[in-house]
Image (cartoon, rainbow, N blue to C red):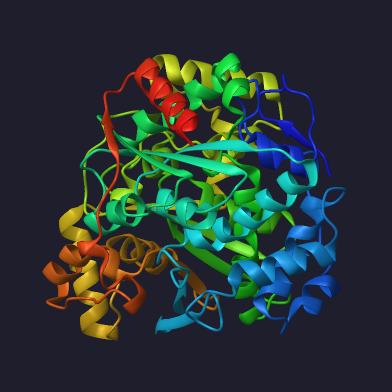
Amino acid sequence: MRYISTRGDARPRSFSDCLLAGLAEDGGLYMPESWPHFPATEWRALRGLPYPELAARVIAPFAAGSLDLPTLERLCHEAYAGFDHAAIAPLVEIENGLFALELFHGPTLAFKDMAMQLLGRLFDHVLTERDETVTIVGATSGDTGSAAIEAFRGSARVSVVILHPQGRTSEVQRRQMTTVRDANIHNIALDGTFDDCQDMVKAMFADLPFRDEVRLSAVNSINWARIAAQIPYYVRAALAFGAPENPVSFAVPTGNFGNVLAAWAASRMGLPVRRLCIGSNRNDILTRFLSSNDMSIRGVEPSLSPSMDIQVSSNFERLLFELLGRDSAACAATMTAFRKTGHMAIPPAAWEKACETFAGLRLDDDETLAEMQRLFRESRYLADPHSAIGLAAGRAGRETGVPMAAAATAHPAKFPDAVREATGMSPALPPRLSDLFTREERYVTLPNDLHAVQSDIRAFLAAR
């Protein structure tokens, strides 16, 4: 399997090369050169497998030529051994036809663990084979950072620098990042929004001398391996509902578009996915696109669901590439214009094609609290704000006779204030995190300035 850039001006790479590179050198995102397709017999053969074995078999075509199946199976078993639920990603029935696909049973209580725990093993495996080291620089709106830190802490071959928007994550999210004391971990609180953090990371990748100097890599969902590692839980859920004979729909609370893109990728592999419903908060650029082809940037507004406080959804570029018939020149021109003007001009035919599969729903903070309250009152289900938005999108997009699985992306204890306001309940952290609020924090606060951030990263690496 080879990978090509959405912008067409980077050389094709193998899975391992793509893993370590993260972002393509032309600023684009890597995509598989062709989509693997599973026939019905192959889907059926996955039924009943333990999650690590199913995950390895689903990911195997994407890693072909870089990792063999036994290696993938070993890495997957290691990645999911520490999860708190034996099913790894259990389905919980909320009401008739609507299910929560719980993705928060990993070490940092968020869906990012589903991919990041595997990425940590993949990086160590490939870097050990090559006898190399890298510096991972990532932006987080709350959950990616802690998941990356947990996956790579203590690694001798990977240094990790995470940028989070100062004051725009929950306290639990921040402390899960800033209380980790391993020498290879460094946290930066940036004076700005998540989009500013994401733009900062992209600017560092675009600075080729700096990129080479620190051997820059990425584990944000711009890294294709993150997407590949998220496909299996959609496959597992679909099989539970009778795929490949019966269709299934998914709903996903979405900020950077990576999680829902993994469900869409599963459909490209032949899984019978009927609808993909996107849940947005007041930062509703994706919902506006689906309702009226309005992909225009507005100011990022803080909300009760901070992991979705995003206006530039990086992974949308991957879908755009496909909607434009894999025309990399058109994709590059569209993305360049988008960043210059703040508006993405998507041809009507491409928009209509997206709307055949995708639908959107927006909830503001009051509506989110009301949905959390309703879920607890009617189903005794305690949902964090993100999961509540996903479940609301699933309910709105449900079709008779087609099961709807909504991604529950974070443990309610990660957002205790919102859960308490909505339900009166105070969700407890798991025992292993019970002392989180007494741990010493360690991070630096920096202005939204590329030179200042690069200088700080150089100093961190020099001190290691």
Residue at horizontal 35%, vertical 51%?
177
Relative image position of residue 380 (x, y in whole percent): 27, 85
Query: Is residue 109 in sight in this rendering?
Result: yes
Which quadrant would residue 414 be assigned to in this image? bottom left
Q: Nearer the viewer, residue 278 or 458?
A: 458
Relative image position of residue 315 (x, y in whole percent): 53, 40
Q: As displayed, is residue 432 above or below residue 224?
A: below
Which quadrant would residue 432 be assigned to in this image? bottom left
Q: As displayed, is residue 195 above or below residue 63?
A: above
Query: Is residue 345 in sight in this rendering?
Result: no
Q: Nearer the viewer, residue 359 or 266?
A: 266
Relative image position of residue 278 (x, y in whole percent): 43, 54
Residue at horizontal 65%, vertical 22%?
25
Relative image position of residue 448 (x, y in whole percent): 30, 23
Residue at horizontal 25%, vertical 77%?
428
323 sits to left or right of 370: right
- Residue found at the far front of this picture: 463
Q: As displayed, is residue 78 above or below residue 32?
A: below
207 sits to left or right of 232: left
Q: Nearer the viewer, residue 317 or 448?
A: 448
Image label count: 0
Which quadrant would residue 302 be assigned to in this image? top left
The quadrant in which the N terminus is found is top right
